[in-house]
């Protein structure tokens, strides 16, 4: 496709900071998004597996995983917004065209997500004592999981459609007849989608290793159950890791001709090496999973996902820049120091203090037997976090009034 047309679709106002910042943040936040998505999908699947079984340990695990799934949906949504912002800033000609071509699905995405999340809560409300009582309404959880996958599939379609500018016109006006309905799904790659979904198994396996270690100090969780969770976590890492690699291999072998240059770059091989290294590292930790080393598997998994996300970006860059001649890094910069600094300071100071407080409370409450009472220091951390939040909100009003008064 003529790159002049792609450049003409750009936002003429330019971008408020160097595009490389958006590019890097886009990759990092996508890695966080997909990690949360994978934990949510893995935890949902384990919830169903346990809920449909009579085995005491599976049901116990299901009860815990339902809590994980609920939280991970909200984390996936929050850290899904970030890559959404970054991708539409630097790849706007591609992202918006892909969105317009399937506009009904983009809007439907929100409705489907709302229904999926509500159904998860319906299952939760009907099964608050999942470990000890008969499962009620498992269909709600099955449908929730299926709809979550539909939501992910819509995102996949958008990510895929943006990579085929040479076909946009044919999709928009098939045979010369305009189709402005926005109801079509024009491009998808089942192997690419399956690759990201299948990584849920090793990622959730790493989560299980952390879960069994986290609960060890608690007297109501017996050792035999936690050992079983550990063994199961390893099974998910080993089998899931190999299955994901095989699916990834098929994805690479079936890349369309215009994308195959990617296989001549080091990225796909780096991903294979990274995933194998992750599985090897996890297994090397096997004798230490009742110690704090159990958490390191999750840490190494996060690094591995960042490398996978970088390779995914390299594929996109190779197509958009290499094949279609569009360079996202030559975007006109209309430097806005204020918003750039506000972003990073908000992230570091507000995000840092609130997260530190939440994580401390979550960590300590999970580690204590009986009712948790926060210490004076933790209380103070909470007050500081709220204080910073109030200041942050107030600063927008002060700024607004300042500009209004000028
Ligand atoms: C909760 C269910 C969700 C699932 C299962 C899911 C799954 C996925 C998957 C599999 C991809 C990778 C697609 C590909 O590369 O082929 C993806 C990408 C993406 N997701 Fe999600 N997602 C979910 C929710 C969300 C939400 C709520 C948002 C935003 C508010 C979001 C934003 C994104 C964005 C922006 C991308 C593409 C990023 C890019 O191309 O740089 N996702 N998602």
Image (cartoon, rainbow, N blue to C red):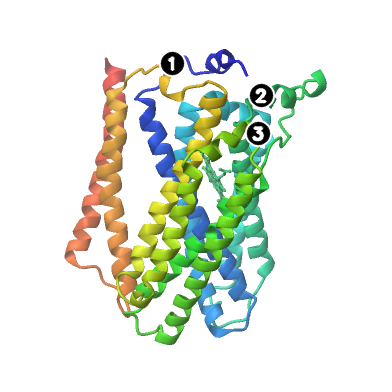
- Please indicate whether residue 340 sits to the left or right of residue 107 in the image: left
Q: Which mark is residue 257?
A: 3
The percent position of residue 404, horizontal first and vertical second, equals 31, 19
Label 3 secondary element = helix
Query: Which residue is identified by label 1?
Result: 13
Label 1 secondary element = loop
Q: CA distance from mark 2 to mark 3?
A: 13 Å
x 47%, y 64%: residue: 68
Q: Is residue 33 visible?
A: no
Q: Mark 2 or 1 closer to N-term?
A: 1
In this view, the mark in front (1 or 3): 3
Q: Residues within 10 Å of mark 3 (few under 14, many from 20)?
A: few
Q: Write down which quadrant ligand 1 falls in.
A: top right
Q: Is mark 3 within 8 Å of ligand 1?
A: no
Q: Quadrant of residue 104?
A: top right
Q: Is residue 291 visible?
A: yes
* Quadrant location of the C terminus in the rendered image: top left
- Please indicate whether residue 329 sits to the left or right of residue 351 in the image: right
- Please indicate whether residue 399 sits to the left or right of residue 134 in the image: left
Q: CA distance from mark 2 to mark 1?
A: 26 Å
Q: Nearer the viewer, residue 72 or 204?
A: 204
Q: Is mark 1 within 8 Å of ligand 1?
A: no
């Amino acid at each position: 496709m003529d790159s002049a047309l792609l450049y003409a679709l750009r936002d003429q106002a330019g971008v408020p900071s160097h595009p490389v910042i958006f590019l890097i943040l886009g990759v990092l936040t996508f890695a966080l998004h997909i990690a949360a998505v994978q934990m949510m999908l893995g935890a949902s699947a384990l919830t169903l597996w346990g809920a449909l079984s009579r085995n005491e340990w599976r049901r116990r695990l299901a009860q815990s995983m339902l809590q994980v799934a609920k939280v991970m949906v909200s984390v996936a949504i929050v850290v899904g917004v970030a890559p959404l912002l970054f991708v539409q800033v630097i790849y706007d000609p591609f992202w918006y065209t892909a969105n317009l071509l399937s506009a009904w699905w983009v809007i439907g995405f929100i409705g489907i997500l709302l229904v999926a999340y509500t159904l998860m809560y319906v299952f939760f409300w009907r099964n608050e004592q999942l470990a000890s009582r008969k499962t009620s309404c498992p269909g709600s959880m099955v449908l929730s999981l299926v709809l979550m996958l539909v939501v992910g599939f819509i995102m996949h379609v958008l990510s895929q459609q943006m990579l085929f500018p040479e076909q946009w016109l044919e999709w928009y006006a098939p045979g010369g007849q305009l189709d402005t309905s926005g109801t079509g799904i024009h491009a998808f790659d089942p192997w690419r989608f399956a690759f990201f979904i299948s990584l849920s198994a090793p990622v959730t396996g790493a989560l299980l290793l952390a879960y069994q270690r986290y609960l060890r100090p608690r007297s109501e969780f017996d050792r035999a159950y936690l050992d079983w969770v550990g063994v199961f976590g390893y099974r998910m890492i080993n089998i899931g890791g190999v299955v994901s690699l095989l699916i990834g291999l098929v994805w690479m072998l079936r890349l369309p001709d215009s994308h195959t240059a990617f296989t001549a770059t080091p990225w796909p091989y780096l991903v294979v090496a990274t995933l194998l290294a992750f599985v090897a590292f996890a297994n090397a930790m096997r004798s230490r999973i009742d110690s704090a080393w159990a958490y390191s598997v999750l840490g190494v998994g996060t690094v591995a996902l960042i490398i996978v996300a970088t390779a995914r970006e390299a594929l996109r860059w190779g197509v958009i820049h290499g094949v279609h001649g569009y360079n996202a890094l030559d975007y006109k910069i209309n430097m806005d120091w204020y918003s750039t600094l506000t972003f990073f300071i908000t992230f570091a100071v507000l995000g840092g203090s609130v997260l530190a407080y939440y994580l401390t409370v979550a960590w300590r409450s999970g580690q204590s037997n009986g009712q948790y009472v926060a210490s004076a220091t933790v209380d103070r951390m909470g007050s500081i976090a709220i204080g910073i939040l109030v200041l942050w909100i107030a600063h927008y009003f002060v700024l607004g009034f300042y500009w209004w008064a000028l």
